[in-house]
Amino acid sequence: MKNWTEWAKENTDPKDATKKPQALDDIKVLDLSQGSFAGIFASSLLSEMGAEVVRVEPPGGDISREMTPEGLKINETGLAYLVEGRNKYHITLDITKDKGLEILEDMLPKFDILIETFPSKYLEKRGLDRERIETINPWLIHCAINNYGQEGPMAEDEGISETLDYDVITQALSGFAWTVGLPEDYTEFPEHSRVPTRMGNWMGWYAGGAMAAFSIMAALLNRDMTGEGQFMDISPAEALMSLNNYAFHLYHLTGQVINRVANFESAAYAYNYVQAKDGLVFLAGYADANWKALCSIIDRPDLV
């Protein structure tokens, strides 16, 4: 009998991954996202579940290939795209030209899912509106990802909606840029540190991409039951906003806005970094049993 280590090595060898059945085998994805890792991450998740993903890039390549720390590239591709360009086929197609749009229309019947991150009504202005797409492929699940959505005043304001959908805009619209960072009255650090703070990674894009992939999976299930495709309007800003736990509940209940709280947690204490002799230590003692143990460790039973 094999021991667990031998069994695990045999059953998790990456070389054998493609030999195993996967949840999205036979599902084909056309990824038209440009300059937005929300769409690129969404197709990454689908590809990891077995879908065949074809990335369509404009001539010269997607600007996402340029995003990389310190200009580091491998074969002219930045590190960020090397992460999310995995498990995909790549083609070049200029859909700003009539011939490119004609080729795109010919491709649509061959795919189950279309992902795009264009400004509102961009495809419609090129003659490829939703009705046209549904006529070409009524089974298609069309997922449009944009901070400003496809309807409403911000989507219709071309001065706003046609700007690149940067992650920092997602974070600002979600409210997180307001709540992350050192408060104004925090005096331990220099003045320039007491400002709203962008999250360290592209959390807005990744939250939007995850929500898009989740919605696409639900749409695939619905298609199996009804035989119909559907159009989905995904806003990364709203996806990230939904992760802002109790912020909106607090406002509706009390009218209070959660301002920058640095390392403090408004809902639980102790749950933050504190200064120690050799640096910082994180304390999580907000449950009664944990708090009692913490008081014992620091020899302050009077605080129990």
Image (tube, rainbow, N blue to C red):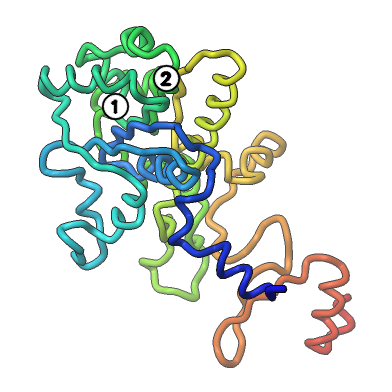
Which residue corresponds to mark 1? 119
Q: Residue 68: where, in percent of width, then height?
A: 25, 60
Instruction: Name the residue tied to disc 2.
Output: 140
* Residue drawn at the location 58% of the way across and 62% of the way down: 11
Query: In the depicted view, which residue is nearer to us: 68 or 153?
Result: 68
Residue 252 picture location, percent across and down: 67, 34
Which amino acid, by three-letter code, is at mark 1?
Pro
Amino acid type assigned to the residue bearing label 2 in the image: Leu
Q: Residue at x 33, y 18 (%)?
A: 109
Q: Are marks 1 and 2 in contact (CB under 8 Å)?
A: no
- Give the Cα separation between the discs numbered 1 and 2: 20 Å
The answer to whether residue 96 is above or below residue 81 is above
Q: Nearer the viewer, residue 188 or 137?
A: 137
Mark 1 or mark 2: name the one nearer the start of the chain. Answer: 1
Q: Is residue 113 visible?
A: yes
Q: Give the side of residue 46 with respect to residue 164, left or right.
A: right
Which numbered disc, 1 or 2, marks the residue closer to the eye? 2
Q: Residue at x 25, y 34 (%)?
A: 163
